[in-house]
Image (cartoon, helix red, strand yellow):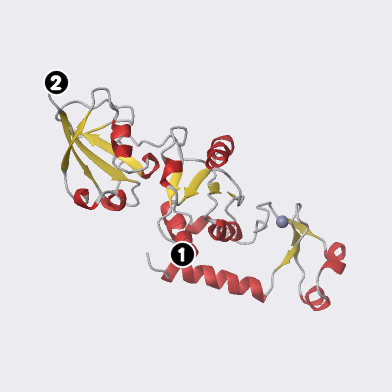
Amino acid sequence: MADMIVTIRFYEELNYFLAEKYKKRRFETSFIKGTTVKALIEDLGIPHTEVDLILINGNSVSFSYKLKNGDRISVYPVFETFDISGLTKLREKPLRRIRFVADVHLGKLAAYLRILGFDTAYYNNFSDIEIVECSLRENRIILTRDRGILKRRAVTHGCYIRSHSPKIQLRESLNRFNLHKTAKPFSLCPRCNKVLIPVSKEKIMDQVPPLVFKTYGNFCRCPECHRVYWKGTHRENIIKLFKDIILFSNQ
Ligand SMILES: [Zn+2]
């Protein structure tokens, strides 16, 4: 039987995942009858969670589309500015309240996200399967530096984190999900990911230094680890640090 051939081109940051010879150009590739476009894309190294739109011969198709000889395929990443309303987006409805589960390499990023108020599950001993199960059970977007996790069939929401630097990783996450305006700094315990609860001054008198007790009026406590948090200069410095990360870190 003659080879079945399609041509395919990947756009924008999807090129990051491709072998050098395939970057930023249309190329031919062969396939076996019955192959879905999703399988082809993942065989070429791109996790399906990074893809937002597939056009075949000019029409948008879903991941389950079965390839036909001669198809001309264009694959696009998650769009940030380009209006694609009217086309079939591959993600199901966006998650209403964005929540994350971070892989074992992203502990620092998880802590940063929690400080900004984004619910982020993270355990330093989570296996890949536990991460996927947590994502599905609790509607969490997987943040990972491991493409293998994103290629698992069950995964519906995920984001490949490119940078090694936690600060730039934070910026990547905020940009990808457009989160800059929805941060609620210091609403979660950075250690436990639990919502902090306001607590009256009297109740925490013996848990904070006397000067802090005298100086500050509003205190919160973590229901899990019982740590007490308050608005202080430390907190202002952290907010400034995050503003700097968001505004100035290199892409
Ligand atoms: Zn806590």
Amino acid at circle 2: Met
Residue at 35% across, 37% down: 89
Residue with the mark numbered 2: 1
Residue with the mark numbered 1: 165
Say which element carries label 1: loop
53 left or right of 127 in image? left
Ligand 1's quadrant is: bottom right
Foreground residue, 11 or 216? 11
Quadrant placement of the C terminus: bottom left
How far apart are the alpha carbons under marks 1 and 2? 49 Å
Say which element carries label 2: loop
170 left or right of 190 in image? left
163 left or right of 19 in image? right
Please name which of the two marks, 1 or 2, marks the residue nearer to the observer.
2
Residue 75 appears at what percent x and percent y?
Answer: 26, 41
Q: Let me know if residue 85 appears in the view.
A: no
User: Relative to 90, does residue 205 appear above or below in the rendering?
Assistant: below
Q: Let me know if residue 77 appears in the view.
A: yes
User: Relative to 34, does residue 124 appear above or below in the rendering?
Assistant: below
Quadrant placement of the N terminus: top left
Amino acid at circle 1: Ser
Residue 63 position by quadrant: top left
Residue 61 appears at what percent x and percent y?
Answer: 28, 31
Residue 127 position by quadrant: top right
Residue 202 appears at what percent x and percent y?
Answer: 87, 65
151 left or right of 218 in image? left
